[in-house]
Image (cartoon, rainbow, N blue to C red):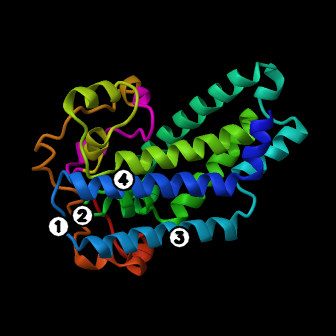
Amino acid sequence: MGAEVLLLHHEAEVRLLCFGGILGLMMWWEHNARLRPTSQPRIRRWVENLGMGVVDTLVLRLLLPVLAVGVALVSAEQGWGLLHYLAWPYAVELAWSLLILDLAIYLQHVAMHKVPLLWRLHRVHHSDLDLDTTTALRFHPLEIVLSMLFKMLLVVTFGIPAAAVIAFEVILNATALFNHGNVSLPAPLERLIRLFVVTPDMHRVHHSWYREETDSNFGFNLTLWDRLFHTYRAQPRDGHLGMTIGLHTLRERRWLSLHWLLLQPFLEGDAD
């Protein structure tokens, strides 16, 4: 429990250190072993995508100053949630909580594609014409707020411990940065890893402009859910080097600009 207390007291530092470390490592990897050539100015994309990540963080802190971790602490004090009634060993609670949160994010991702109003927000992420680790930060702030509200509801409903919330956020950020990378693992290693964890090759299929491929491989961390719910697709039909990233629409250069990305859900009509 001492480690948990230390983690709670240094949550922001832990998350920032992990995020910065993984982002830097992935950008170094992409620089030295880039899989696909880029079609858009890379530095400009980095600035705009990283800028979107900064905006998301600021909006969250402004609108929801008490985030999922704070809700978890209140739930623990009040004894709210299913896990407080089950009296399982703490390690089992942590493992179960991580599974619940991972499944929930998978289901949330499916909903973002299937519900038209949510898709208008989520397609900001898919409108990137190239795919690299910075694409993991390209989410509209309203989608991030809705996601946080959903996680808060899960925390209260299940009584998820604060340490599990922090651990899950670190894992989610790390795996998103990893599986959006413009890199590829050696084939034997990639096949082994994707049995358990989403790889760049697996997630790249999800960013294809073919809708049947966009609507597949929804997982960010575990591949279990895509396999279980039959949304798994092994490879893109045009191959990883020949596939087109993005959507059939929203391909104008202006969508590289941060202010246009923020306005995109409210300006464009129906889009792929």
Mark 2 highlights which residue? 129
Question: Which comes sooner in the sequence, label 2 or label 4?
Answer: 4
Residue under label 1:
39
What's the residue type where badge 4 is placed?
Met
- Horizontal side of 61 relative to 103 (left or right) equals right
Q: Residue 110 location, x and y as percent?
A: 43, 42
**Image x and y of residue 6, in percent:** 76, 45
Q: Element at badge 3? A: helix
* Mark toward the start of the polypeptide (2 vs 1): 1
Range covered by the magenta-colored residues: 208-225
Q: Nearer the viewer, mark 3 or mark 2?
A: 3
- Marks 3/4: CA–CA distance: 19 Å
Of residue 98 and residue 207, the one placed in the foreground of this image is 98
Q: Mark 3 or mark 1, which has the lower sequence index?
A: 1
Q: Secondary structure at mark 1?
A: loop
Q: Which label is found at residue 26?
A: 4
Q: Give the amino acid at mark 3.
A: Val
- Residue type beneath disc 1: Ser
